[in-house]
Amino acid sequence: MGSRYTIVRPDHRLAEYAGYCALVVMSKVPKVGRVKTRLSPPLTSAQAAELNIAFLKDTLCCLQQVAETAHAIPLISYTPAGEEDGFLGIVPERVPLLLQRGDGFGERLRYTVEDLLATGFRAVCLIDSDSPTVPAHAYAQAVRHLLSGEDCTVLGRCDDGGYYLLGLNASHPHLFEEIAWSTELVAEQTRQRAREIALPLHELPAWFDVDDRRTLARLHQELVLAPNSNGFEAAHTRQTLLRVLHQLEPELVSTVASGDSLS
């Protein structure tokens, strides 16, 4: 039996994608022990996976809001192959899936861009699945830049030096070469690669991704302690965070709220 999802294939060009920007979330199929492993501890592997699922739901909700007013279509670029139905109940079945290919992270990003351009999209935004409170207007701004007719790139930098979004409207493999992935150098090295090929780069508002105790504490502050109207409301994440914190021992709750480690 085949997947319930539409599986996008780079060898199959679709007229309905012409003129649109792909808002593609880079995601693993969310299984316990495979996702958000740096949040365990203080969370259990199961709680970390719950939070990852909530992040994915909220990111897609935000992207769908953007798609309602812009020429954009949300998608998922996923791994591993053959586990597409692991997204059931998490990713709406109307959201197309694209299987990631390539050996390293940089290759998977590069080929996601090239494969989606090959299917007919005018532009592609690579989006992480760890930043559920990025505001919709940031994504909408990226779409406007990429569909303006200028050959350019758009960068949404994270406070830790990575990025939550990289947008392109043409294939530029150099942007993914010689990058120290998973370090604080990623955004700056990407800027440098753009300069090396004289590619105009537009910056979005800086934001943050959630991948350790400190950023989990920041998320708790933003969604629970002092809701921040500047970010996306991320209702699934807020509800999951409250439920997870209720399950933790009081001592662990305090470490989550402060971002500190247990001594």
Image (cartoon, grey):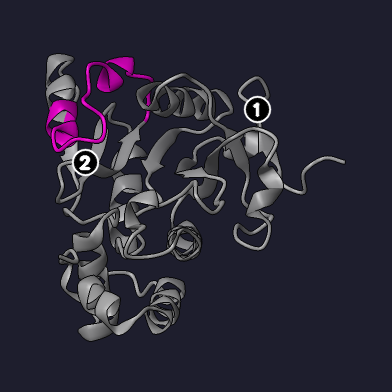
Vertical position of residue 144 compared to residue 57: above or below: above
Residue 230 visible in the snapshot: no
- Relative placement, left or right, of 30 versus 192 is right
Vertical position of residue 115 compared to residue 156: above or below: above
Vertical position of residue 137 compared to residue 178: above or below: below
Give the quarter of the figure containing the N terminus.
top right
**In front of the other: label 2 or label 1?**
2
Q: Position of residue 33 (x, y in %)?
A: 50, 50
Please name the residue that numbered disc 1 is placed on.
9
Disc 1 crowd rating (10 Å Cα; few below 14, some 14-19, many 20+) is some
Vertical position of residue 54 compared to residue 253: above or below: above
Q: Position of residue 142 (x, y in %)?
A: 30, 46
Quadrant of the image occupied by residue 94? bottom right
Local SS, label 1 = loop
Residue for point 18% across, 39% down: 202
> Is residue 252 magenta-colored?
no
> Is residue 172 magenta-colored?
yes
Quadrant of the image occupied by residue 244? bottom left
- Report the span colored magenta: 169-190
Q: Which mark is residue 201?
A: none
Local SS, label 2 = loop
- Relative placement, left or right, of 57 versus 257 is right
Q: Position of residue 240 (x, y in %)?
A: 45, 75
Q: CA distance from mark 2 to mark 1?
A: 28 Å
Amino acid at dot 1: Arg
Quadrant of the image occupied by residue 96? top right
Q: Which mark is residue 162?
A: 2
Residue sitting at the far front? 263
Amino acid at dot 2: Gly
